[in-house]
Every structure is written in C-alpha cells, then in structure tokens.
Image: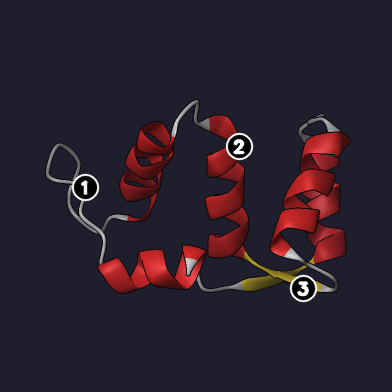
C-alpha cells in the first residue's frame, strides 16, 4: 500500500471499471493529488466516501489495512491512522 502511482494510471483504471468520474475527482481534490498518488491515502479517502458513518469508515480501514489473519482482530497500528488522517 506504500506504492505511489501516476494519476494517469489511476484515472485509466477508474474508467476501466466504469466508475463515476465525479467520485474520482472528489478523491483527488480531498487528497490534493497532482501527479502521483500514494495508494494507501487514496484508499483511505475512497473508503471514507463509502462509509455512512465514521464508525463504518474506521471498520473498513481496519479490515483493509490489517496484517492479522482473516477472522482475527482487524488491528492496525495507530501510527498508520496518524499517517492517513493526521
């Protein structure tokens, strides 16, 4: 998730999936992404748009970024939250 991708690459994949371009534009504005985009920050913003509440968003973030095995506690380090949202 630490990988940075060119914006053009993300736009192309977004369009390949036939997703709404307005949602992508909103993610790009919130993340202030210009030429490159860090994948984990992109995902954190996108998940925030999916959740109906802060609780839902945090659950999805934990499930997405945990290194714990499936069925276990979906823990993530607090420094990851600080990096994504601080």
Q: Position of residue 62 (x, y in %)?
A: 32, 48
Q: CA distance from mark 2 to mark 3?
A: 20 Å
Residue 84: numbered disc: none
Q: Are marks 2 and 1 in contact (CB under 8 Å)?
A: no
The mark lying in front, picked from 2 and 3, is 2
- Position above or below: 78 against 74: below
Looking at the image, which is closer to me, 78 or 42?
Answer: 78
Q: Is residue 38 left or right of residue 64?
A: right
Which residue in the protein does label 3 denote?
36
Residue in the image at 82% along x and 29% along y: 18
The answer to which image quadrant residue 78 occupies is bottom left
Q: How many numbered circles are shown?
A: 3
Q: Is residue 8 left or right of residue 68?
A: right
The mark lying in front, picked from 2 and 1, is 2
Instruction: Check disc 2 and report its element: helix, strand or loop.
Output: helix
Q: In terms of sequence position, does the residue under pointer 1 or pointer 3 come before the other?
A: 3
Residue farthest to the left, as pictured: 72
Q: How is the image coloured?
A: secondary structure
Q: Position of residue 16 (x, y in %)?
A: 82, 38
Which residue in the protein does label 1 denote?
74
Q: Are marks 1 and 3 in contact (CB under 8 Å)?
A: no
Which residue in the protein does label 2 denote?
49
Q: Position of residue 6 (x, y in %)?
A: 79, 69
Q: In terms of sequence position, does the residue under pointer 2 or pointer 1 come before the other?
A: 2
For label 2, the crowd category at 10 Å Cα-Cα, with few meaning under 14, some 14 to 19 and many 20 or more, is: some
- Position above or below: 74 against 76: above
Residue in the image at 82% along x and 64% along y: 7
Q: Is residue 45 left or right of residue 62?
A: right
């Amino acid at each position: 998730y630490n990988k940075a991708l060119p914006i053009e690459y993300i736009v192309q994949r977004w369009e390949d999936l036939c997703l709404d371009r307005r949602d992508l534009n909103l993610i790009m504005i919130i993340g202030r992404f210009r030429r490159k985009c860090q994948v984990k920050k992109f995902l954190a913003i996108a998940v925030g748009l999916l959740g109906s509440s802060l609780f839902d968003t945090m659950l999805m973030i934990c499930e997405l970024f945990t290194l714990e095995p499936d069925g276990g506690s979906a823990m993530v380090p607090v420094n990851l939250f600080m990096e994504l949202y601080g």
